Each structure stands twice: as C-alpha cells, then as structure tokens.
Amino acid sequence: VKTFADLANAQALQAQTGYHMQQQQLAQQQTQQAAMANQQQAQQIADQQTIQQGIMQSQFSHIWPNVVSEIRQEPELWALYRQEYGAIRDDIANLIARCQGRGFIDPRRNCKVEADRLCALVDGLMMAVVGEPDRFPPTHVREIVAYHFEQLGRVWPAAADLGS
C-alpha cells in the first residue's frame, strides 16, 4: 500500500525526470544549431577559397587580355566566350544568393550586380598581377578578394539609398 508520502515522492521524481529530459533535449537542440552554424560558416569559407584558388591558379592570366582581344574578332568565338563567361557570372550570382540565404551577405545586395563587380575585380587583378607582379603577389591578391567578401557581408547605412 502506497502512502501519501510515497505518491508525492513518485510525482516529484517524475517531475524531476521530465525536467532533466527537457534540459537534455534543449542541450541537443542547441548543439545541433551550433553544428549547423559551424557547417554554414565552413561552407562559406570553402566557397570563398574556391573562388580565390580559381583566381590564383589561372594558367591564362598572362595571355588572357590578348586572347579576349582576338576572340572579339571572331563572332562565333565571341558568342561562345560571352555564353561561358555569362555562365560563370550566373554561378557567382547563385553563390552570392546562397550566402545571402545563410545570412552571410546583406540581403539587399543585388546578386547579379555583385557577380559583375566580382568578375570585374578578378579581371582587374589578373591584369595587375601581369603588370605589377611585385606589387600584387598571391598573398596580396587573396587579401584583396577576402576584403571584397568582408564588404559584401556588411550592412552599410548608405546602401538603402542605392536601392536594390
């Protein structure tokens, strides 16, 4: 026969067990959220490194301006070039949109404009590396590109005036 005290102790134990289970579930949720945040941050870093490596490993940076100049003279090649370069810009715009979706880039930024801006930056850097290799060693180029990505993540008060 259970006494009132036994029943009260059983209810207290049950309440305490429920509380601990809730605490464990909360801790698991927090751990999962932290892991997801770390995974998203790691993906952003990997995406940035992929772009940076592409810039630095280009075998054609020294001859590219001449190649583009020659391609412009051939309508079929020029159309192919524009198609391929457009696909690269579209991929970059999609990457920027993914980063916006993860909260790493200001969502007010126009993905296509930012992709054009990044491509222009990379094209300019390729010319700078050729023209002034001492001033633009790989470490400095990486620093410039990293700075560009840092700026994408910032929310500037003046950005609202630019529209989207």
Image: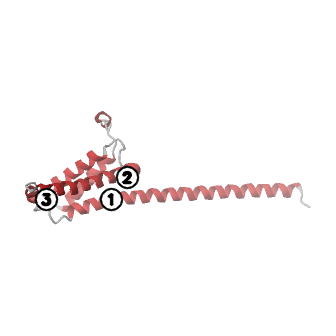
Q: Considering depth in this image, is 24 or 65 the residue closer to the camera?
A: 65
Residue on which disc 1 sits: 47
Q: Which residue is mark 3?
A: 129
Which residue appears at 14% of the width and 57% of the height? 76
Label 2: how many residues lie within 10 Å, few (<14), some (14-19) or many (20+)? some
Q: Residue furthest front?
A: 76
Mark toward the start of the polypeptide (1 vs 2)? 1
Distance, label 1 to label 3, CA atoms, is 22 Å
Mark 1 and mark 3 lie on one chain; the one further toward the N terminus is: 1
Q: Which mark is residue 98?
A: 2
Left or right of residue 12, residue 162 in this image: left
Could you tell me which residue is drawn at 45 percent across and 56 percent down?
37
Left/right placement of residue 102 relative to residue 77 reads right
Q: Residue at (85%, 58%) from the top-left corner?
A: 6
Query: What amino acid is found at the position of numbered circle 1 in the picture?
Result: Asp
In the image, residue 63 sits, relative to residue 154, either above or below, namely: below
For the C terminus, give its image quadrant.
top left
User: Distance between the Cα atoms at labels 1 and 2?
Assistant: 10 Å
Q: In x, y percent, where is residue 131?
A: 8, 57
Residue 14 location (% of width, % of height): 75, 57
Instruction: Find numbered disc 2 in the image and state the secondary structure of the residue it sits on.
Output: helix
Indicate the amino acid at tag 3.
Val
Label annotation for residue 106: none
